[in-house]
Image: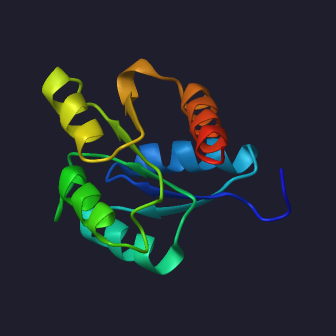
Amino acid sequence: MADAKIKILLVEDDTFLVEMYTTKFDLEGFLVIAAEDGKKGLEMAEKEKPDIILLDILMPKMDGFAVLDALKKNKDLANIPVVLLTNLGQKDDVKKGFEKGAVGYLIKAHFMPSEVVDKIKKILKESKK
């Protein structure tokens, strides 16, 4: 990897998951910043300009779909890849996520943290093409 660490914004209200994913991504050489609700996540995206955003859907203050809408409407943030990392696995939710501009949709229960890291690496590699 280059000298500059890839910055991931993790928007997740479950502190256990935040710690687990932060540790996993740190070990892989990523810089992780976290927000515990959608409103803070949006504020941090504007301030930090991360390379990629991992976004939960069910959160306090502002759900992930509303955050995704706001990100895509902001010209400074619209090109940041967003991966929905959630437990909502209904086809309608997945479809809605992609229609709103997400580049990935990962169901937490289906992936080990190491698999999530691998998926994020793959998405980042593809977005650089």
User: Going 76% across and 50% down the picture, which residue do you hit?
Assistant: 29
Q: Residue furthest bottom?
A: 47
Front one among 117 and 129: 129
In this rendering, position of residue 121 left or right of residue 59: right
Give the x, y percent position of residue 110. Answer: 40, 19
- Quarter containing the C terminus: top right
> In terms of image quadrants, where is residue 21?
top right
- Position above or below: 55 against 24: below
Front one among 45 and 22: 45
In this rendering, position of residue 3 left or right of residue 118: right
User: Going 42% across and 40% down the picture, which residue do you hit?
Assistant: 103
> In terms of image quadrants, where is residue 94?
top left
- Position above or below: 115 against 27: above
Give the x, y percent position of residue 121. Answer: 65, 38
User: Going 62% across and 33% down the picture, which residue do you hit?
Assistant: 122
Give the x, y percent position of residue 18. Answer: 46, 50
Give the x, y percent position of residue 119. Answer: 57, 31
In this rendering, position of residue 99 left or right of residue 52: left
Would residue 37 be visible to someone looking at this image? no
Q: How many marks?
A: 0
User: Going 69% across and 51% down the picture, which residue do you hit?
Assistant: 26
- Position above or below: 48 against 126: below
Would residue 4 be visible to someone looking at this image? yes
> In terms of image quadrants, where is residue 70?
bottom left
